[in-house]
Image (tube, helix red, strand yellow):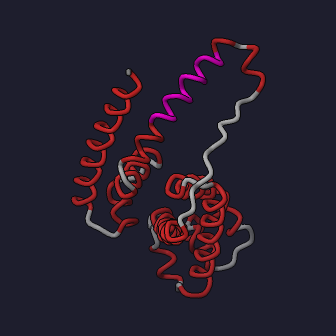
Amino acid sequence: MTGSDSDNLALEVHRNRDGAVDRLVRSYQGRLFNYALRVLQNPFDAQEVAQDAFVRACRALTSRYDESKCRNLELGPWLFRITRNLAFTRRRARESRREVPVPDAGERPEDTLSHPAEATRELEAGEEQEVLRRALDRIGPEARELILLRFMEEMSYAEIASIVGTGEAAVRGKVFRALRKLRATLNKIGDINAL
């Protein structure tokens, strides 16, 4: 990892520096929660997974890893890998119990009624997001995960390879195929909506 030891958040957590855990959580909580939410499609499960990921990360950094390992740790991809493993485990458990995720209520603020142009733009954006969400649901979990990591989390191919445990070249090919699958699915949904 580049930078001095004072810039290394993993090392600061390892050394039990004041506020290090809080900074770790503040730095990554939104991204890890959103990633878990996209994988699990259930906000309660996503919140539990994100919290568990931080607990496991802090436990590893403070008791299992030495200073050298903390100093060289790629913290972001490592946290996403923990979150990924927990989310996939939770999803498998949920599927074995045949739970159905609660759909998003899609509540809208009341003040949009006073601004019709803004309300129309929000409605159109909401409809586009719903079409994208439906298409992502249809392409399968592996393809959806790759698209989320690459384009919504804006991770590099190397970071994604580190998270999913495969080579960078393989990730590039899988992302390309996932995008092709997403485009085909979006076209099908567009054809259905045109009827």
* Highlighted magenta segment, given as a residue range: 118-131
Instruction: Residue at 51% x, 35% y: name it.
Output: 130
Relative to 38, residue 161 above or below = below
Question: Is residue 25 in view?
Answer: yes
Q: Quadrant of the C terminus?
A: top left
Give the total number of marks visible in the rendering: 0
Residue 54 on image: x %, y %: 62, 70
Question: Is residue 75 in view?
Answer: no
Q: Quadrant of residue 50?
A: bottom right
Residue 90 on image: x %, y %: 54, 69
Instruction: Residue at 50% x, 75% y: name it.
Output: 71
Relative to 168, residue 18 above or below = below
Q: Quadrant of the N terminus?
A: bottom left
Residue 115 on image: x %, y %: 71, 13
Answer with left or right where residue 194 lies relative to residue 11.
left
Q: Quadrant of residue 112?
A: top right
Relative to 147, residue 81 above or below = below
Relative to 121, residue 171 above or below = below
Answer with left or right where residue 96 lies relative to residue 29.
left
Instruction: Residue at 35% x, 34% y: name it.
Output: 186
Residue 126: say if magenta.
Answer: yes
Residue 34 on image: x %, y %: 57, 52
Residue 108: say if magenta.
Answer: no
17 or 58: nearer the eye?
58
30 or 158: nearer the eye?
30
Q: Main secondary structure of the magenta part?
A: helix
